[in-house]
Each structure stands twice: as structure tokens, then as C-alpha cells.
């Protein structure tokens, strides 16, 4: 028999962090990892517009796993004493994002103008993911002013939004659709 999904422990408007501390569901830390969860869901939506096994799809799938790590990282205060090892975002993950950015960007035409979200369906969805990544980054900046979240999470989201921008352009290129240039 499957375990019940509902616990009723959150019926009072609180939720538990890793380590047992209970906080209000509107706590900034919950907003942060909730937005990361939203971003992960959008990346799942992106993947429905991609061909499985392509370079872009493989990268997006890997990013979804990284976002689970980021969510766990944010759900575990740095000063919390936890018996289990909680995965954390590392400098190596940031370097991997940078390598992906460089790998995809090298084959794209130089930007001469700002571009608008759009073109192919996959590109439009990747642009949506990029904007949610930027929102998550803004929330983390606010959270970092109130609590210790470590040095890698904000940098990771900053690079992730850059990668999502490049992947949106790469999705258009793969579909043979030009980027939509902004016409002032």
C-alpha cells in the first residue's frame, strides 16, 4: 500500500525545513525553493517541446536534477545540524553551466540587437524558464540579506538564466527559425 500523500501537518500554514524547524508557508526561504520548484516544472514543460535525446534535451534534463539539489540546499539552513548528507550546489556545477553556455553559444550568430522571446515553441518555453530563473535569483538575493544561504546558489541561478537564454537561441537555430529581433 502506498503511503498517504497528505500529512495534515501543514494545515496550520506552516511547513517543515530539513532538520525539523517549522516555518510559515510564506517564509522567504519557502518562496525561494518554491520558485525553484516552479522553474523545474517549467523545464519539464520545455522538454515536451524538445526531441528526446538531443543535446538541448539532455542539458535540460540535467538542469532539472541540479534544481532538485538547489531546492534541497535551500530547504536546509546552513547552520542546521542534519544527520543525513544534504546535497548542496557547488562551484563545479557552476563551471558545468559555463561550459554549456560556451558550447552552445560558439555556434550561434553574434547578437546585433536585443531579441524578443519567441521563434520556436521550445525557444519560447526556454525564455519563460529564463524569466522564472531570474525571479528565483532575485528572491535568493533578498533571502541572502536575511539568512546565510552560502556563496554558490545565487551564482548558480545567474549562470542558469544565461544558459537558458543561450539554449532558447540554440532551439531556434536547431529549428531553422531566426531569433525575433527587437525593433525599436
Image (cartoon, grey):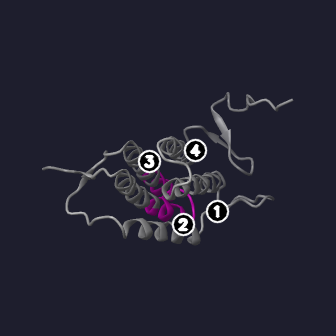
Residue at (53, 61) in percent of width and height: 153
Instruction: Measure the C-alpha gap from mark 1 to mark 4.
Output: 17 Å
Instruction: Measure the C-alpha gap from mark 3 to mark 1.
Output: 22 Å
Q: Under tag 1, what secondary structure? A: loop
Q: Which residue is mark 2?
A: 152
Residue at (35, 52) in percent of width and height: 172
* Residue 62 or residue 152, whichever sits in front: 62
| Number of numbered labels in the structure image | 4
Q: Is label 2 in contact with label 1 (beta carbons under 8 Å)?
A: yes
Q: Under tag 4, what secondary structure? A: helix
User: Of circles 1 and 4, which is in front?
Assistant: 1
Q: Is label 4 in contact with label 3 (beta carbons under 8 Å)?
A: no
Q: Quadrant of residue 151?
A: bottom right
Q: Which residue is mark 4?
A: 30
Image mark for residue 129 = 3
Instruction: Measure the C-alpha gap from mark 4 to mark 3.
Output: 19 Å
Residue at (64, 51) in percent of width and height: 75
Up the image or down, 39 lies above or below 147; here it is above
Q: Which residue is mark 1?
A: 88
Q: Earlier in the sequence, mark 4 or mark 3?
A: 4
Label 2 environment density (alpha carbons within 10 Å; few <14, some 14–19, many ≥20):
some
Q: Earlier in the sequence, mark 3 or mark 2?
A: 3
Q: Which residues are magenta?
A: 138-159
Amino acid at each position: 500500500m502506498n503511503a498517504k500523500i497528505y500529512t495534515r501537518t501543514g494545515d496550520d500554514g506552516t511547513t517543515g525545513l530539513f532538520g525539523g524547524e517549522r516555518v510559515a508557508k510564506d517564509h522567504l526561504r519557502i518562496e525561494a525553493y518554491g520558485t525553484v520548484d516552479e522553474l523545474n516544472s517549467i523545464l519539464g514543460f520545455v522538454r515536451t517541446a524538445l526531441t528526446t535525446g538531443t543535446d538541448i534535451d539532455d542539458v535540460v534534463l540535467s538542469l532539472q536534477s541540479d534544481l532538485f539539489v538547489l531546492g534541497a540546499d535551500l530547504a536546509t539552513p546552513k547552520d542546521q545540524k542534519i544527520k543525513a548528507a544534504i546535497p548542496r550546489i557547488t562551484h563545479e556545477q557552476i563551471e558545468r553551466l559555463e561550459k554549456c553556455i560556451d558550447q552552445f553559444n560558439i555556434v550561434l550568430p553574434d547578437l546585433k540587437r536585443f531579441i524578443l522571446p519567441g521563434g520556436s515553441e521550445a525557444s519560447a518555453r526556454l525564455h519563460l524558464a529564463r524569466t522564472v530563473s531570474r525571479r528565483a535569483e532575485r528572491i535568493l538575493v533578498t533571502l541572502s540579506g536575511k539568512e546565510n544561504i552560502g556563496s554558490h546558489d545565487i551564482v548558480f541561478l545567474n549562470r542558469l538564466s544565461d544558459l537558458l537564454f543561450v539554449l532558447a537561441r540554440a532551439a531556434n537555430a536547431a529549428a531553422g527559425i531566426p531569433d525575433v529581433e527587437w525593433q525599436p
